[in-house]
Each structure stands twice: as structure tokens, then as C-alpha cells.
Image (spheres, rainbow, N blue to C red):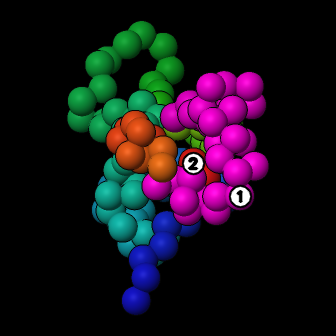
């Protein structure tokens, strides 16, 4: 059986915010959403949620839901989903690109090119090809 990860939806984030405002714990919210507790706690930590017992008393209106905002969390998630986690190594015009083109023009298969590059420079990844 394969484990798959499904991102939180905006509806789930809204439900998290409302549940926090009602005083539910992250564990209770996880049960309601049928998600792992770690998923909810990571979401809250990622979006600066503070447990009500740890909140510093400030003047003015208290922060609802410990500072968690569903709309802001969804905007952050959307923004980060478009951003690459690591820079591309195989870019048009780079020396690596030129070497790959030469090897492919010499009628090497992509697998052969990958093997040749590994022998030349062990840090080249096979996932580049």
C-alpha cells in the first residue's frame, strides 16, 4: 500500500481556524479532519500559531485562533507551491547542457549519457535527464 500526501485545502484551513477559535486542540482538529496530528501541528507551526496558554498578554483585542489565519495560510501555501525547492542544474546554454547535446548527437541514449556524466562528475544526478 502506497502512502500519498494530500495538501490541505482552503476549506480545511478555514475549519482549522474556526476550530481553534472554538477552543479545540490540534489533536481534536486532526480527528475532525481525519488527518494525522503531525499534519495539523506542522500547519500551525508553519503559520505562527501560538497556544493560548503561551500567548503574551497584550493591550487591545486578543488574537483570535492564536494568530492562525486561514486566508494568509492558503496564500502562503499557494506561493510556495510554485517555487522550486532547488535550482535547476541542466539549463539551456550551460556547459552541462552543451555536453548532453553533444552526447545525444553522438547517438547515445539518455541512460548512457547519464552514466557517462556520472563517471565524469559523480555529483551529477541521473534525474536531470
Question: Closest to the observer: 63 or 27?
Answer: 27
Residue extending furthest toward the left: 53
Q: Does residue 78 show up magenta in the picture?
A: no
Residue extending furthest toward the front: 106
Q: In this view, does 17 lie above or below 121?
A: below
Q: Name the residue under label 1.
A: 107
For image coordinates 52% across by 34% down, the residue present is 86
Relative placement, left or right, of 30 versus 112 is left
Q: Quadrant of residue 50?
A: top left
- Measure how far apart labels 1 and 2 are at the Cα level: 18 Å
Which secondary structure, mark 1?
Answer: loop
Q: In which quarter of the image is residue 56?
A: top left
Question: Closest to the observer: 46 or 112?
Answer: 112
Q: Which of marks 1 and 2 is nearer the N terminus?
A: 1
Question: Closest to the observer: 112 or 37?
Answer: 112
Q: Name the residue under label 2.
A: 128
For image coordinates 65% across by 42% down, the residue present is 100
Q: In this view, does 116 lie above or below 58?
A: below
In the rendered image, residue 60, in percent from the top left (x then y), is placed at: 48, 13
In the rendered image, residue 123, in percent from the top left (x then y), is placed at: 38, 38
Stretch in magenta = 86-115
Amino acid at each position: 500500500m502506497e502512502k500519498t500526501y494530500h495538501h490541505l485545502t482552503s476549506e480545511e484551513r478555514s475549519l482549522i481556524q474556526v476550530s481553534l477559535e472554538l477552543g479545540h486542540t490540534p489533536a481534536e482538529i486532526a480527528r475532525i479532519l481525519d488527518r494525522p496530528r503531525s499534519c495539523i501541528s506542522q500547519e500551525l507551526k508553519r503559520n505562527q500559531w501560538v497556544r493560548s496558554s503561551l500567548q503574551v498578554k497584550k493591550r487591545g483585542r486578543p488574537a483570535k485562533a492564536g494568530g492562525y489565519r486561514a486566508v494568509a495560510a492558503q496564500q502562503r501555501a499557494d506561493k510556495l507551491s510554485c517555487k522550486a525547492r532547488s535550482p535547476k542544474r541542466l539549463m539551456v546554454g550551460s556547459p552541462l547542457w552543451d555536453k548532453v547535446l553533444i552526447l545525444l548527437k553522438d547517438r547515445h541514449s539518455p541512460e548512457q549519457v547519464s552514466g557517462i556524466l556520472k563517471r565524469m562528475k559523480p555529483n551529477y544526478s541521473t534525474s536531470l535527464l
